[in-house]
Amino acid sequence: MHSHSSPAPLRADVVVVGAGIVGLAHAWHAVRAGLSVVVVDRDDRAVGASVRNFGHICTTAQSGRAREYAVVARETWLRAGAEAGLAVSAHGTVVAARSVAEMAVLDEFASGRDRDEVCVLGADETADRLGWAVPGLVGGALMPRDLRVDSPAAVPALTAHLARLGVVFRFGENVVDVVDGVRTTHGSYVADTVIVCVGHDVDRLFPVLASDGEVRRCRLRMMEIDPPRGVRIDPGVFTGSSLLRYGGFAETAAADTVRAELASLDPDMLTHTVNLMCTQRPDGRVVIGDTHHYERTLDPFDDEALDALLLDRFCGLFGVDDLVVRRRWRGVYAASAQGPYLHASPRADVVVASVTSGIGMTTAFGFARDVLAQRGLIP
């Protein structure tokens, strides 16, 4: 007669649930503080918001706590790039302004920042920085401290580097519950601290917490196109609609005029909460987007009209008649009307940490450091 027993739980100082950028950021700071770390993820690799974005580290346009986190994250990305062999572009962001109202936002924003953070440009200077002449360009601004990574390559590279530092990764294990540690479809883990970094899926494990935090899913439409006329775009690119998306711009008095202008001239941009921006991948293809729609449970059907809207507006931005689309995808991230971060402790040994806005790549390293420091796990 043979007895069967479950294997002993794997023990660590910290177990992180979720191997997206927020989970990896917690693992980064924890392992560097000398803590033993296990990261558990249901998928075989990161396939969520952390690899479906622009790879844009938008430090300068943040405000408040997000700005503080972004400053920390910027330095961490530079360090991670140097240590892990990640390509981190430091060409900044250029904002292309196509109206007097948009320039007024940039002037007001720049007046409250140091020159090494933002520099207002004339139309010719803006076109030179962009690499092409935008139809109707009035002027713009350069934010030289912003960074850019190629997310589909950077996140796996960061994961591999953390594994070399001693972080144990358990991919392909779905978490069943977080009670007395973490139980997955493959085993159990015991830790002094469990940090749940599952973004919008927090409602699967902690539904009451998600409801109280008004966590919803934000659905995006994004595409990858061939570079129009073979253009080389070194910086990240923002447009007038971006001035309504980021706190540093949106908090200016002049932003109200931009919103009114869009409502009058191009209301579809507001209806679909479009942030018309782009970045270029190392292979030359250009990532364009994006629309934003908010629901707790997402509609499974994608409307082709949204892609048509984006392509039309980008044809106007690039001054071309058509664009060659190579890939399309839906992005999904956590959103909340209560603010850009969900940080809660449903039990003494459990922390829930989600970036509830589209600034995970920009701020996760700073957010994670704060979460760990508040628990006394790092200095």
Image: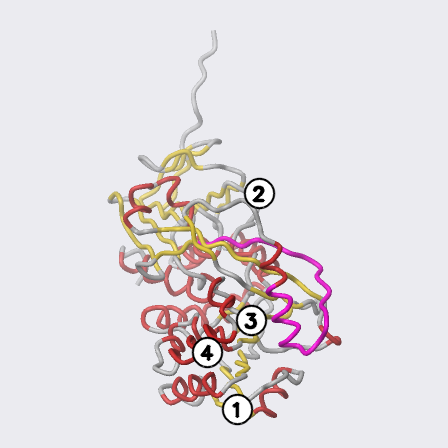
| 332 in magenta | yes
Give the mark nearest the N terminus, 1 or 2.
2
Give the label on residue 261, or none.
4
Q: CA distance from mark 2 to mark 4?
A: 46 Å
| 171 in magenta | no
Q: Badge 3 is on which residue? A: 277
Q: CA distance from mark 4 to mark 3?
A: 18 Å
* Residue 51 placement (x, y as % from top left): 56, 56
Give the label on residue 121, or none.
1
Give the mark nearest the N terminus, 1 or 3.
1
Q: Residue furthest right?
A: 229
Q: Badge 2 is on which residue? A: 44
* Mark in front: 2 vs 4: 4
Q: CA distance from mark 1 to mark 4?
A: 22 Å
Q: Residues within 10 Å of mark 2 (few under 14, many from 20)?
A: few
Q: At 54% from the left edge and 63% from the top edge, which residue is drawn?
A: 290
Give the mark nearest the N terminus, 1 or 4.
1
Q: Secondary structure at mark 2?
A: loop
Question: Quick check: marks 4 and 3 in contact, CB under 8 Å?
Answer: no
Magenta span covers which residues?
Answer: 309-333
Q: Secondary structure at mark 3?
A: strand
* Mark in front: 1 vs 4: 4
Q: Amino acid at mark 3?
A: Met
* Residue 229 placement (x, y as % from top left): 75, 76
